[in-house]
Image (cartoon, rainbow, N blue to C red):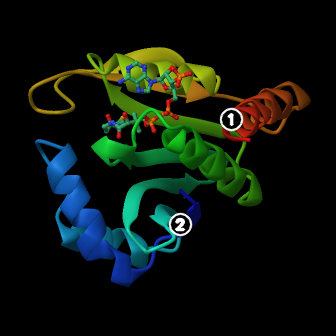
Amino acid sequence: MTITIRPMERGDIPAVAELENEIYDQPWSPRVFFDELAMGNRRYLVASSKGGMILGYSGLLIVEDDAHITTIAVAEQSRGTHLGTRLMLALVDVARDADTRHLTLEVRVSNDGAQRLYERFGFDPVGRRKNYYKDEDALVMWATDIDNDAYQERIAEIRAAIEDATT
Ligand SMILES: CC(C)(COP(=O)(O)OP(=O)(O)OC[C@H]1O[C@@H](n2cnc3c(N)ncnc32)[C@H](O)[C@@H]1OP(=O)(O)O)[C@@H](O)C(=O)NCCC(=O)NCCS
């Protein structure tokens, strides 16, 4: 299936919010997505099928040198097909285009799958935020110096690996 990753638009929000409700116990409301899109230092992406179905989304908050990944999610039926990886690759491109140098995020301490994805992108755990999710602590992860050659090589390898897997 051909899937395009492109900037999220206001018209995508009902479908994004529906996915959000399916995926998360404490979902963002449509209003939160509208507010996020209205802010100048946010960048949101969607993964859309040829028919226009939203299969995933992700977002960044940009503050000076740092790009904070605010969300990333893939529809359950599309997981394990590298869509999460493609959304992360697109976020790294957006972060670089915005001249940021470091990436950070929070993830549930129990979310091993997502942590594995982030580790592949060079994220290291640096701390814990107590009860960040009301019912669970968050692991705080950082990928630093994304502007250096070593990081760019890592990204090129990830990109090449998923291209090999899909051709
Ligand atoms: C995390 C998430 C976005 C990953 O999306 P995805 O499309 O399945 O990811 P990919 O297919 O690109 O997987 C990339 C790698 O991540 C790891 N991974 C992702 N999900 C995994 C899982 N459930 N179990 C184990 N490893 C997993 C694997 O290392 C995988 O590599 P592999 O395919 O070579 O085994 C998706 O599982 C999701 O939406 N989860 C619910 C929302 C969520 O937890 N978001 C993160 C909030 S911090």
Q: Quadrant of residue 133?
A: top left
Query: Residue lying farthest bottom?
Result: 11
Q: Amino acid at mark 2?
A: Asn
- Can the viewer see residue 26? yes
Give the camera-side residue of 131 and 116.
116
Query: In this image, 92 relative to 37: left or right?
Result: right
Q: Secondary structure at mark 1?
A: helix
In this rendering, the answer to whether 2 lies above or below 141 is below
Q: Between disc 1 and disc 2, whose residue precedes?
A: 2
Q: Secondary structure at mark 2?
A: loop
Query: In this image, 76 relative to 2: left or right?
Result: left
In this rendering, the answer to whether 167 lies above or below 49 is above
Question: How far across and how far down the image is residue 57, in percent?
Answer: 42, 56
Give the residue at mark 2. 41
In this rendering, the answer to whether 62 lies above or below 103 is below
Name the residue at 32% across, 48% down: 75
Name the residue at 74% across, 29% down: 161
Question: How far across and how far down the image is residue 16, in percent?
Answer: 30, 65
Do labels 1 and 2 touch, CB within 8 Å?
no
- Can the viewer see residue 27? no
Q: Quadrant of residue 25?
A: top left
Which part of the image, by quadrant, shows the C terminus? top right
Q: Amino acid at mark 1?
A: Ile
Give the residue at mark 1. 162
Question: How far across and how far down the image is residue 37, in percent?
Answer: 41, 74
Question: How far across and how far down the image is residue 58, in percent?
Answer: 45, 53
Q: Residues within 10 Å of mark 2 (few under 14, many from 20)?
A: some
